Image: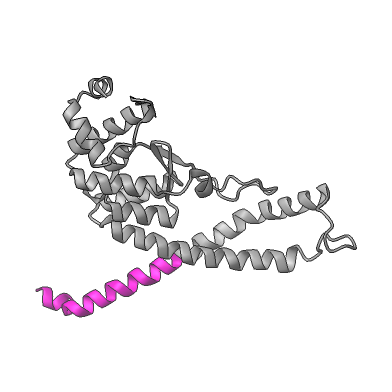
């Protein structure tokens, strides 16, 4: 314990207090000897960094609890084997807890962390977080920097995810119904896919990726035009028009 405290730059008394508050995991014991490792040291440095950023010990305890209850990173990133290349080319981002705090400051709460884990934006991998998408992380950071609470950003993200799943369902139904109409059963219900079947499915999906993205981009752009125009007209009517401003 004394060696760990010295490495972390804290007193043994402080280390005992952190242990009592369950801010660090229990050591490995061999008889009367308690062994600490790099994981414990990394946790102490994380606590120190979060304290420097203004978090309370109570808030840090809640964050660490949510952190430890996070889903496995493999589950989030979907590392199961597939024969079709991933449609998405999103780049995951690894973040230390203190780096996450730098992105969202006071909005890094246990509630927001739990919501992010639930939506699937982040997962826990060892002593780090993994955010599923660089573009989504940058968008969330920009919105919070503009003054939008992270809780509202996450709720909007949950709604967007629901609508995106519905749109993906429309396209996959079209593909399955009209372009993959010849089931590769080859006379038996359980016949395995042949290399030719896999090549045909993969080629079809890869060809349709830019088509679907173009449709969604065009429809979203036109929908934003319609909604912004309607909002501006409603705002002008509510303010009494140009004459009221004079």
Residue 105 seen by the camera: no
Q: Nearer the viewer, residue 120 or 124?
A: 124
Tell me the residue at 61%/48% (across/down): 86
The stretch in magenta equals 221-246
Q: Position of residue 196 (x, y in %)?
A: 83, 49
- Rendered image coloring scheme: one colour
Q: Position of residue 140 (x, y in %)?
A: 34, 51
Quadrant containing the C terminus in the rendered view: bottom left
Q: Position of residue 97 (x, y in %)?
A: 32, 39
Q: Residue 172 is drawn in which quadrant?
A: bottom right
Residue 48 seen by the camera: yes
Q: Verify whether residue 41 appears in magenta.
A: no
178 displayed left or right of 112: right
Tell me the residue at 65%/68% (across/down): 173
Quadrant containing the N terminus in the rendered view: top left
41 displayed left or right of 195: left
Q: Residue furthest right?
A: 187
Q: Nearer the viewer, residue 216 or 66?
A: 66
Q: Position of residue 179 (x, y in %)?
A: 74, 63
Q: Residue 191 is drawn in which quadrant?
A: bottom right
Report the predominant secondary structure element of the magenta stretch. Answer: helix
* Number of on-image labels: 0
Q: Nearer the viewer, residue 17 or 48?
A: 17
Tell me the residue at 33%/30% (across/down): 40
Please, is residue 136 above or below residue 224 in the view? Answer: above
Q: Nearer the viewer, residue 125 or 39?
A: 39
Please, is residue 220 above or below residue 246 in the view? Answer: above
Q: Residue 189 is drawn in which quadrant?
A: bottom right
Please, is residue 126 above or below residue 175 in the view? Answer: above
Tell me the residue at 46%/61% (across/down): 161
Q: Residue furthest left?
A: 246
């Amino acid at each position: 314990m004394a060696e760990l405290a010295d490495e972390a730059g804290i007193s043994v008394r402080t280390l005992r207090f952190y242990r009592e508050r369950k801010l660090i995991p229990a050591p490995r014991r061999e008889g009367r000897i308690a062994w600490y490792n790099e994981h414990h040291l990394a946790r102490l440095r994380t606590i120190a960094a979060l304290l420097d950023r203004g978090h309370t010990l109570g808030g840090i305890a809640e964050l660490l609890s949510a952190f430890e209850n996070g889903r496995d990173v493999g589950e989030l990133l979907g590392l199961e084997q597939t024969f079709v290349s991933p449609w998405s080319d999103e780049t995951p981002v690894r973040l230390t807890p203190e780096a996450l705090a730098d992105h969202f400051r006071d909005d890094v709460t246990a509630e927001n962390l739990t919501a992010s884990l639930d939506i699937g934006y982040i997962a826990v991998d060892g002593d780090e977080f993994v955010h599923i998408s660089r573009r989504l992380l940058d968008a969330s950071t920009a919105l919070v920097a503009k003054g939008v609470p992270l809780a509202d950003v996450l709720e909007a993200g949950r709604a967007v995810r629901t609508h995106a799943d519905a749109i993906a369902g429309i396209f996959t139904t079209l593909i399955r119904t009209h372009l993959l109409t010849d089931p590769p059963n080859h006379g038996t219900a359980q016949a395995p896919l042949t290399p030719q079947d896999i090549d045909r499915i993969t080629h079809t999906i890869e060809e349709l990726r830019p088509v679907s993205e173009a449709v969604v981009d065009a429809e979203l752009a036109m929908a934003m035009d319609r909604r912004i125009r309607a909002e501006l007209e409603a705002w002008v009517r509510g303010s009494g028009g140009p004459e009221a401003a004079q």
